[in-house]
Image (tube, rainbow, N blue to C red):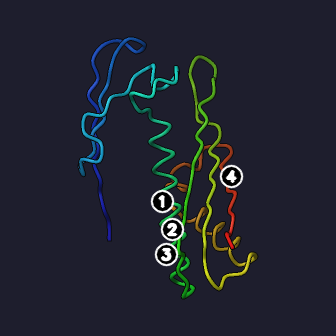
Amino acid sequence: MAAEKHASVHWEGAGKTGKGQVSTETGALKNYPYGFASRFEDDKRGTNPEEIVGAAHAACLTMAFAFALEREGLAATKIDTRAAVRLAKDGDGFKIDRIALELDASVPNLDEARFQQIAAAAKAGCPLSKALASVPEITLKATLAG
């Protein structure tokens, strides 16, 4: 089985003063604004590539963890995942040098040691973790509630 998903960007203008719009085939993002200010100046009226990568990585890890639990005959009552993606100066440009993931879950009948093993395996096996393997530091803090 293979799945191909699509997204597009429209941009007008120069790098610092230009404006872009991000769209996804599902319509989850439709002409959503982004630009220099939303990427580097904390303008909350638009998005940026790093928060989109973070959302995608958090979503991927969450699903991978849910499927891993299911293979163990378990189910979470809740999973909350956050990602912090750091964009750092790299010579004349920038690079993503760290992604910090935090997964909080409530899973009945699961002990802490096995929870940590399943979470680590889910992080390693999630397609976004694999795609982002060139990021020097990807961490996971997994917390089992209850």
* Residue denoted by label 1: 60
Mark 4: give few (<14), some (14-19) or many (20+) Cα within 10 Å. Answer: some
Residue in view at x 44 percent, y 42 percent: 52
Q: Relative to residue 86, is residue 101 depicted above or below? A: below
SS label for mark 1: helix
Q: Is residue 65 left or right of residue 31?
A: right
Asked if labels 4 and 2 touch by Cβ distance under 8 angstroms, the answer is no
Mark 4: which amino acid? Thr
Going by the numbered disc 2, the residue's amino acid type is: Ala
Q: Residue at x 65, y 47 (%)?
A: 100
Furthest residue toward front: 146
Q: Which residue is mark 4?
A: 139
Which amino acid type is shown beneath numbered disc 1?
Cys
Residue linked to disc 3: 67
* 66 relative to 131, above or below: below
* Quadrant in which residue 97 is drawn: top right
Q: Position of residue 146 (x, y in %)?
A: 69, 73
The quadrant of the rendering that contains the N terminus is bottom left
| Residue appearing at x 53%, y 61% in the figure | 61
